[in-house]
Image: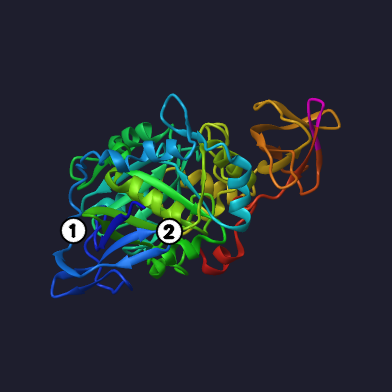
Amino acid sequence: MQLLSLQFAAAGYGCGPKSSKLKGYFKDVSGMVQRNHFRVTKHGFVKKPRLWVSAASASSLDLVPPPIDNDLQVIMKDMGAQFSSGGIVETFGNDEASLKAVEDSVAVVDISHFGRIRVIGDDRIHFMHNQSTADFQSLSEGQGCDTVFLTPTARTIDLANAWVMKNAITLLVSPTTHESIVTMLNKYIFFADKVEVHDITSKTCFFSIMGPGSDQVMKLLNLEEVVGKPYGTHLHYAVEGNPVTVGVGSVLSETGFSLLLSPTIAGLIWKSIIEFGAIPMGACAWERLRVLQGRPAAGKELTNEFNVLEAGLWKTISLTKGCYIGQETIAKLITYDGVKQHLWGIQLDSPAPVGSNITVNGTKVGKITSCAPGSNGIKHAGLGYVKRQVGFPGKEIKIGDIKGVLVDVPFVSHSLPVTMQMAGK
């Protein structure tokens, strides 16, 4: 049986070495990191003799190609992966099993086709604070949040996951927007601003781990320090000298975990996660799960046609931080109760063409923006915008001759969450 060698030490993308102790891996001693070597077998980690090494550098993202025996695509192909022409894993031929694993065990998905953006420089916090909806100035190193990029009229561009690191802010954005967002952000950098924006998509990989068994996988990887932390919390390590960031939240949910890592060791880590019981998931199943969870997607629910409150992304918005792009429109919508439609989940008897009108008693009340096969007894699932006065859970609608019913979805809120009201955010 082939054994995989993992080496964990303090490191990260734009971060300094961790000083806290991580059980089973390392501790900081007088500027040095005590690092254990492990072999990964089907039975777990087997400790090898300790070595003393310096903390891995986090300043460079110029990564070397992985050894062929740990090439991620080769490993995935051996697991039955079917790739799109763009190199995205569409399916492992197990879509139903992977969706079930999210419900009762654990699944892992490679969403490296999503964009990753790195914002650096002394003014990065102030800059990002002004460019999107979240209150970045309230966040400390090691924390994270969801934030939305808007037009000046609060129309939606994209929903991003943000991690605030020691020397950088790292953003996960949609596959279709990362180039345009980099261009947009660079446009707003003025001469005196100490800010740089870099697209690191091709230099990194990104995995999400989902399901009730996610905590156990983290513990088996000896990464239990991240378990139980608040959403957005992230810690930094190195595997064989390559940086890995592990964060709380799986993009579709505030539970589970995400890993930002070097392509050099992506295959090695993918194999380890699978060996510890995770079911691999492809992009087709992930899209079905996205619709079921209600996470809005760029170019579908997030377009110039809809504003951020209609999209149900209240929890991403700071109401107290002051000026940012789209802030004035948001303030007016809230003050004058001006939200006219809401994003809803839709359970359907049959698949419906995206973009079709949603009707009630023959009258147009909205339109469908996403549709996918359902799961767990749901035939087909959709997302769509419906006029506020007719939208409520259980409302029967039609899309052409196709019958459907509106349902709440986990990711969407139709008003300011109570926790935000109490916190005055």
The residue drawn where x is 46% and y is 50% is 208
For residue 58, above or below residue 289: below
Q: Where does label 1 land, which residue?
A: 56
**Is residue 70 rendered magenta in the image?**
no
Pinpoint residue 53: horizontal percent, then vertical percent. Answer: 14, 65
For residue 343, above or below residue 228: above
Q: Where does label 2 land, which residue?
A: 42
Pinpoint residue 393: horizontal percent, then vertical percent. Answer: 77, 49
For residue 46, above or below residue 359: below
Local crowd at mark 2 within 10 Å, few (<14), some, or many (≥20)? few
Which is nearer the eye, 407 or 112?
112
Name the chief secondary structure element in magenta: strand
Judge from the rendering whether residue 255 lies leftward or rightward of residue 241; answer left or right: right
Q: Amino acid at mark 2?
A: Lys
Q: Is residue 338 visible?
A: no
Image quarter for residue 403? Answer: top right
The residue drawn where x is 32% and y is 33% is 183
Q: Which range is magenta?
A: 397-402
For residue 227, above or below residue 404: below
